[in-house]
Image (cartoon, grey):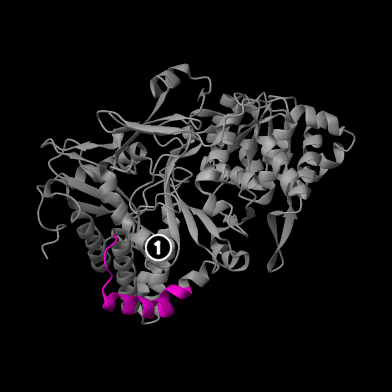
């Protein structure tokens, strides 16, 4: 059994809670700009002291409205400044937030609110109110409902004016390290979501130790980040708390369609994103170059960037010709992409799915070091992460201080330490099944190199065993295919079948540009595009590239392009855009069966 464990670099404080992090930040730098709010075409700073003042005022409102310490409060909202304001106000009031993805269906909302025992709910929009109304009759415990779009946060502040400061100080000091801080429900990719009990210690100890490990990122002069992934997810939630602890200025942009203008005006020093965001940035730039007749230049620039970064990482001598081309492309291509991201981005923290070495090397040559990491809801997000001073593209980095990671005999990743959750809420059976002693069994497969850098190789429950007995990890094939501009999602199939096949969907955002650049009608429907010869050839090209990375027995022999889109609304993706493999296999069983209805031929296999 392979194991790497790193001692905590910050001593544990059994009495600490998340609210203490804000108190300490205000004490150290009261005038520091901790947040920035969009104002006109720019941003208005909010100091640490002003943020705390607003937090206390809102906490008083919750107290005046009848919230008691330990009460569960559901929160459905997008990623905005108000999200973190409400988060800390609930900490100060002694309550426990139950975040709900703002895209959740009424059925999902009903399950999370009823299972958690939430007694109140905060909603951002009329759409959220409508969703709650559909299931309100099934939620007898829900008393108070505050609607942000009706100005209820301001009303709470006004109603709490008479609550004494001493009462808020008493309440915010009640919780200690072992007490529940929040109840976050898993995304439900393999069944009904389970509530993860994350403690104050999970957040406090992980934030304090991560700030040391990532000091170059979060303590550099003028450190700032623009959050755009949902703060209901543990990844962004942890970063928002880490930013308060470390004094990082944070902005928010919930509308990803406005992300590029927001990056240009906010100019962050680091980003937090999932691999799909980096794929979109790359693919959009490629298609834009193609449309302007500069596609060949962009592809040459990308090839040079990747080769330059790879040679750098290997410590090899970079040939003069490569250095010259890199310098030329830096002025023609890379500089423009840096400017599109605000011009000041030095680091990008990536998680939730494997990024792939190609994109890692590309962005590295742009001057953006992508620090890929690994973690789950159950580990309060990061367990491992690449460090600014020690990063390996293609890995998810070494173990963080205070964390241990080991691989069992099957290669399953198991985690213990300051970040591991307490239990599944009201589910002792699932809790017992998830642990081997104090080691949490992640269900993911991985491998370590000699220096302790972890790489993710697949998901234990997703391993496909062909009729010939070959074990196939779908991610090794799916990730490179998904990086193609016109591919939306892909699911590899073939369990107990004679060969591997794939279900593919098209990306409706990227498809029109690709069609136009290839002399085809940009308004072609998904249904027509799915059977178009040029589209099929492009998907085949993506599959050929993926097949080069595996053995013949593991390669995709057939595929079908489905005339539909997999989304969270359709029930096929989780809120963090992970595929619900079991749902897809059920809903598209006929398409899978059709792939194996006839013996394999060369129709969908490249013979080039």
Residue 426, given in percent of the width and then of the height, sits at 53, 19
Q: Would you say 169 lies left or right of 227 here?
A: right
Quadrant in the picture for the N terminus: top left
Residue 441, given in percent of the width and then of the height, sits at 37, 28
At horizontal 14% and vertical 61% (from top left) the residue drawn is 606
For the magenta stretch, what is the residue range?
315-336
Quadrant in the picture for the C terminus: bottom left
Q: Would you say 526 lies left or right of 601 here?
A: right
Q: Residue furthest right?
A: 162
Residue 370 in magenta stretch: no
Q: Which quarter of the picture shows residue 223?
A: bottom right
| Disc 1 secondary structure class | helix
Up-down: is 113 above or below 264? above
Residue 316 in magenta stretch: yes
Residue 358, given in percent of the width and then of the height, sits at 32, 60
Up-down: is 584 above or below 411? below
Q: Count residues near mark 1 (Cα–Cα under 10 Å), then give few for <14, some for 14-19, many for 20+.
A: many
Q: Main secondary structure of the magenta part?
A: helix
Q: Which quarter of the picture shows residue 168?
A: top right
Residue indicated by mark 1? 364
Q: How many marks?
A: 1
Q: Would you say 302 lies left or right of 497 here?
A: right
Instruction: Examine the rendering and report whether any part of residue 264 can be seen.
Output: yes
């Amino acid at each position: 059994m392979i194991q790497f464990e790193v001692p905590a670099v910050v001593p544990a404080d059994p009495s600490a809670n998340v609210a203490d992090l804000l108190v300490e930040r205000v004490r150290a730098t009261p005038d520091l700009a901790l947040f920035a709010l969009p104002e006109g075409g720019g941003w208005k700073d909010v100091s640490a002291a002003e943020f705390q003042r607003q937090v206390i005022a809102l906490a008083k409102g919750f107290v005046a409205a009848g919230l008691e310490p330990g009460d569960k409060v559901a929160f459905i909202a997008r990623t905005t400044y108000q999200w973190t304001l409400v988060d800390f106000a609930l900490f100060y009031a002694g309550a426990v937030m139950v975040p709900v993805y703002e895209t959740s269906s009424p059925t999902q909302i009903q399950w999370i609110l009823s299972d958690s025992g939430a007694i109140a709910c905060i909603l951002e929009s009329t759409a959220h109110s409508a969703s709650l109304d559909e299931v309100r009759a099934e939620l007898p415990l829900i008393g108070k409902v505050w609607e942000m779009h009706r100005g209820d946060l301001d009303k709470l502040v006004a109603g709490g004016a008479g609550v004494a400061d001493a009462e808020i100080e008493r309440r915010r000091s009640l919780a200690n390290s072992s007490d529940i801080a929040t109840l976050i429900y898993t995304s439900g990719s393999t069944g009904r979501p389970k509530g993860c009990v994350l403690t104050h210690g999970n957040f406090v100890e992980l934030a304090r130790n991560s700030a040391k490990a990532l000091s170059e990122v979060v303590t550099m002069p003028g450190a700032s980040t623009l959050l755009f992934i949902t703060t209901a997810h543990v990844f962004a939630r942890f970063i928002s708390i880490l930013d308060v602890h470390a004094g990082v200025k944070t902005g928010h942009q919930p509308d990803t369609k406005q992300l590029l203008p927001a990056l240009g005006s906010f100019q962050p020093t680091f980003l937090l994103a999932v691999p799909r965001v980096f794929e979109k940035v790359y693919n959009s730039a490629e298609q834009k170059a193609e449309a302007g007749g500069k596609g060949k230049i962009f592809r040459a620039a990308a090839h040079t960037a990747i080769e330059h970064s790879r040679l750098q990482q290997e410590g090899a001598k970079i040939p003069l010709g490569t250095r010259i081309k890199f310098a030329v492309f830096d002025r023609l291509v890379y500089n423009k992409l840096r400017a599109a991201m605000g011009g000041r981005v030095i680091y990008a923290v990536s998680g939730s799915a494997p990024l792939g070495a190609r994109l890692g090397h590309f962005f590295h040559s742009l001057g953006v070091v992508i620090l890929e990491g690994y973690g789950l809801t159950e580990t309060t997000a990061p367990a491992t992460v690449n460090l600014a001073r020690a990063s390996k593209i293609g890995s998810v980095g070494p173990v963080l201080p205070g964390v241990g990671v080991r691989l069992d005999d099957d290669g399953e990743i198991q985690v213990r330490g300051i970040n591991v959750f307490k239990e599944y809420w009201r589910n002792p059976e699932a809790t017992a099944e998830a642990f081997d002693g104090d080691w949490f069994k992640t269900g993911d497969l991985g491998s370590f190199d000699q220096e302790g850098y972890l790489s993710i190789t697949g998901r234990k429950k997703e391993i496909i065993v062909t009729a010939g007995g070959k074990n196939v990890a779908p991610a090794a094939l799916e990730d490179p295919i998904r990086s193609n501009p016109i591919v939306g999602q892909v699911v590899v199939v073939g369990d107990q079948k004679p060969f591997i096949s794939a279900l593919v969907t098209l990306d409706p955002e990227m498809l029109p540009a690709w069609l136009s650049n290839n002399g085809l009608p940009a308004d072609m429907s998904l249904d027509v595009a799915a059977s178009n010869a040029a589209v099929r050839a492009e998907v085949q090209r993506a599959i050929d590239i993926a097949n080069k990375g595996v053995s013949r027995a593991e390669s995709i022999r057939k595929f079908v392009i489905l005339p539909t889109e997999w989304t969270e609304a359709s029930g096929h993706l989780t809120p963090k855009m992970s595929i619900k493999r079991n749902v897809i296999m059920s809903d598209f069983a006929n398409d899978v069966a059709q792939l194996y209805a006839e013996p394999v031929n060369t129709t969908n296999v490249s013979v080039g």
